[in-house]
Image: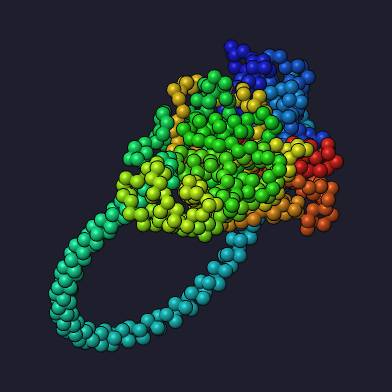
């Protein structure tokens, strides 16, 4: 029944509402303060339903939809009771009237019934009613009651069960009281005999006590005298120690003052030496600059100007975290949507991507071509004042050299790549976060060209990769030293010498050629060019590459006949974000941004905000999230051949902690579990459903998956009431995978 004066919405109008708004509309129309209904239980096959639905006051209910067909109305239909576990099924009996909480039915059921308000009863909440509803008590004309047999039987059995249980409890109480009374009588008799014995002991004890008191008084007087003497001696000893300690403290203070002055002198000397050393090195570098052995850009990199070293965070717009992480992500969402090309991402997707960037783990973006994977990297970087580099992967990449380049021993120079240049750019720009995206990451085998990085990412402190041997840099230094010593031997003024004047002085060039031992095969300009190339390579590309802390790695993948599958080793180290079609997100983005004001520009999130790469949290088996994932691994994943080691569990705790910076309340634990199932567990589903499950006898893999799906439905049922926190529930995604497997001869493949 609807409220007076209210107008029922159409199906189209209700479909535009979110889950929470639909339930509120339904309860307002029914005049309910609590989602509770009463109905008669019926069983159809393996499923349970409620018929003859009313509210707790006995009022008949109708779906408040203006254009709902007659056959789909609540009074003509029934309500599905789900999910029903084995434990819940024991308390359900057919033809009983029960009360239960309700919520929206699954999205697929609502679409099948063409009813966006279709409800389902929650089996965990089913219980017998405390009274017979008034509408179930028909009165006859003669004043008698013609009570329906099923209603009477339900209530009668419920009352009988209650009374029988109460009688049983009373019988137990009576038996306990009788036993206790007999035990008390025995104890009273024993206490009386004990009392007589105690009286005899008390008399003897009083006599002994009198003797002890007299002896105690004498000994106490003796101890008091000894204590007074000891106190006087102790005070004298303490006074002597205090005087000695004061003298020692005074001496230490004098020594400390002397040491402080000495330290200040040493610091001054060291500073003077350091300044002199810097001046000396700079003067030598100036000589290299005048001789054009290093470029102006290399000089600026070695000796940056003061203007380049300020602490100002680049970019315009408000600086995070003044408004908090949640508000910053909302700002990013609004800014992207206000751009001319209307970039629309749900808030939950942006927040999840931000949390994953803070974990510093590898992120893999999967989905159909054009679903916005690479665009997310670009849009997020631009909207937060940071930088991105998109590196296209080639199908012919077979080694790390294709990714990071190689050292050319003939030219004694390193051949760089766009990927390596991106890391150098990040090192030169530490105030901004650099997101390096490997586009079409699986066009080549990831393990072939990215293996070094996968291994080095195990070192969470300061991962580094050797580019070429240190002795190659030593060769460059030796040739440079020979050249500089030869120039120094000509007794030229180092402050005025330059390459142009040197080449124009024929006499000096002849002496230099003689000192360097140059023959007819090589001229000084050739030697100069060779040393310049070698020196430039040594300055630009160091022998060991340390991955800058302001770099995050992202991979975008497509799955088709031209790409390679991702190995368990890679998936074990990565989080997989699966993208749906942007059209699926569009209406949700519009609803989330309704009522918000446009923003003037991007928000600035500097690199120092993102946590530095550190050790993963220690393994804690008692952590609720770890415990839940471990239970899943032992009960469901191990039989499917999916191993969940220590690393993913520690990654899960870190991800949960980062997610808690964006979401408030106790729901973070459940939200993290849902996202981790989608990002770490489901992407590893690739097996034959008809194969026997490991260690489960004749049980097949598809049966284990079905049980896993049922468990997730129970564990994640509270997520259905969260509005805007999730993109899709893990149990729904697993259900879709089960449907694909059934249509594919039982083959499970997340990437299909």
Q: Residue at x 36, y 36 (%)?
A: 312
Q: Is residue 215 above or below residue 660?
A: below
Give x and y (percent) for residue 553: 57, 43
Q: Is residue 639 above or below residue 748?
A: below
Left or right: where 749 falls relative to 581: right
Nearest the viewer among 540 and 569 is: 540
Left or right: where 91 falls relative to 656: right
The quarter in which the C terminus is drawn is top right
Q: Is residue 492 above or below residue 99?
A: below
Q: Quadrant of residue 720?
A: top right
Q: Is residue 94 visible?
A: no
Q: Quadrant of residue 205?
A: bottom left
Nearest the viewer among 126 and 205 is: 126
Left or right: where 686 falls relative to 134: right
Nearest the viewer among 87 and 239 is: 239
Nearest the viewer among 611 and 346 is: 611
Q: How many marks?
A: 0
Q: Residue at x 57, y 40 (%)?
A: 418
Left or right: where 425 falls relative to 6: left
Q: Quadrant of residue 172?
A: bottom right
Q: Is residue 446 visible?
A: yes
Q: Residue at x 67, y 28 (%)?
A: 370
The quarter in which the N terminus is drawn is top right
Give x and y (percent) for residue 547: 52, 49
Q: Is residue 600 above or below residue 152?
A: above
Give x and y (percent) for residue 169: 64, 53
- The scheme the figure's colours follow is rainbow
Give x and y (percent) for residue 527: 49, 50
Q: Residue at x 74, y 29 (%)?
A: 109
């Amino acid at each position: 029944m609807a409220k007076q004066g209210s107008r029922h919405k159409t199906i189209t109008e209700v479909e535009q509402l979110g889950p929470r708004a639909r339930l509120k509309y339904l309860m307002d129309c029914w005049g309910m303060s609590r989602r509770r209904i009463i109905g008669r239980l019926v069983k159809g096959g393996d499923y349970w339903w409620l018929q003859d639905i009313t509210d707790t006051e006995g009022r008949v209910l109708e779906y408040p939809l203006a254009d709902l067909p007659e056959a789909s109305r609540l009074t003509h239909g029934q309500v599905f009771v789900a999910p029903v576990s084995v434990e819940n099924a024991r308390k359900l009996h057919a033809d009983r009237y029960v009360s239960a909480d309700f919520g929206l039915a699954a999205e697929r059921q609502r679409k099948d019934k063409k009813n966006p308000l279709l409800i389902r009863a929650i089996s965990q909440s089913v219980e017998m009613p405390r009274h017979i509803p008034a509408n179930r008590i028909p009165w006859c004309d003669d004043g008698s009651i013609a009570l329906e047999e099923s209603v009477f039987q339900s209530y009668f059995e419920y009352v009988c069960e209650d009374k029988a249980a109460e009688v049983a409890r009373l019988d137990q109480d009576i038996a306990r009281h009788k036993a206790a009374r007999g035990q008390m009588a025995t104890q009273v008799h024993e206490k009386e005999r004990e009392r007589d014995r105690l009286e005899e002991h008390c008399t003897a004890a009083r006599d002994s006590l009198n003797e002890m008191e007299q002896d105690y008084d004498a000994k106490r007087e003796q101890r008091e005298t000894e204590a007074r003497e000891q106190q006087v001696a102790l005070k004298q000893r303490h006074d002597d120690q205090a005087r000695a300690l004061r003298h020692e403290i005074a001496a230490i203070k004098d020594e400390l003052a002397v040491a402080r002055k000495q330290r200040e002198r040493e610091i001054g000397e060291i500073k003077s030496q350091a300044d002199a050393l810097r001046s000396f090195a700079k003067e030598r570098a100036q000589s290299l600059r005048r001789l054009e052995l290093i470029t102006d850009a290399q000089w600026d990199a070695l000796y940056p100007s003061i203007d380049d070293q300020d602490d100002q965070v680049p970019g315009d717009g408000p600086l995070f975290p003044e408004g908090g992480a949640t508000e910053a992500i909302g700002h990013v969402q609004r800014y992207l949507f206000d751009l001319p090309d209307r970039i629309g991402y749900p808030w939950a997707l942006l927040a999840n991507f931000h949390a994953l960037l803070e974990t510093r783990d590898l992120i893999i973006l999967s989905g159909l071509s054009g679903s916005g994977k690479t665009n997310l990297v670009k849009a997020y970087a631009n909207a937060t004042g940071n930088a991105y580099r998109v590196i296209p992967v080639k199908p012919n990449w077979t080694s790390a050299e294709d990714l990071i380049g190689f050292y050319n021993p003939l030219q004694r120079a390193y051949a760089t790549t766009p990927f390596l240049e991106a890391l150098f750019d990040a090192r030169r720009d530490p105030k901004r976060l650099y997101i390096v995206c490997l586009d079409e990451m699986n066009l080549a085998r990831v393990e072939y060209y990215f293996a070094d990085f996968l291994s080095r990412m195990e070192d969470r402190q300061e991962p580094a990769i050797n580019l070429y041997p240190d002795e190659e840099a030593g060769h460059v230094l030796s040739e440079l030293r020979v050249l500089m010593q030869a120039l120094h031997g000509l007794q030229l003024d180092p402050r005025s010498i330059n390459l142009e004047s040197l080449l124009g002085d024929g006499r000096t060039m002849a002496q230099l050629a003689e000192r360097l031992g140059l023959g007819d095969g090589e001229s000084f300009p050739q030697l100069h060019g060779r040393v310049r190339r070698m020196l430039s390579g040594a300055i630009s590309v160091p022998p060991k590459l340390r991955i800058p802390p302001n770099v995050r790695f992202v991979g975008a993948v497509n799955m088709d006949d031209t790409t390679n599958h991702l190995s368990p080793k890679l998936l074990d180290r990565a989080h997989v974000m699966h993208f749906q079609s942007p059209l699926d997100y569009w209406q949700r983005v519009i609803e989330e941004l309704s009522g918000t004001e446009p923003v003037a520009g991007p928000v600035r999130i500097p690199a120092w905000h993102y946590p530095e790469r550190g050790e993963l949290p220690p393994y804690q088996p008692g952590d609720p999230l770890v415990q839940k994932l471990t239970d899943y691994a032992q009960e469901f994943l191990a039989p499917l051949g999916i191993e969940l080691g220590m690393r993913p569990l520690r990654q899960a705790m870190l991800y949960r902690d980062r997610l808690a910076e964006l979401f408030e309340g106790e729901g973070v634990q459940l939200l993290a579990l849902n996202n981790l199932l989608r990002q770490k567990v489901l992407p590893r589903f690739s097996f034959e459903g008809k194969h026997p499950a490991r260690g489960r006898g004749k049980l097949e893999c598809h049966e284990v998956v079905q049980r896993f799906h049922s468990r997730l439905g129970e564990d994640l049922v509270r997520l259905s009431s969260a509005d805007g926190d999730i993109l899709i529930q893990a149990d729904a995604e697993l259900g879709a995978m089960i449907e694909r497997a059934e249509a594919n001869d039982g083959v499970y493949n997340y990437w299909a």
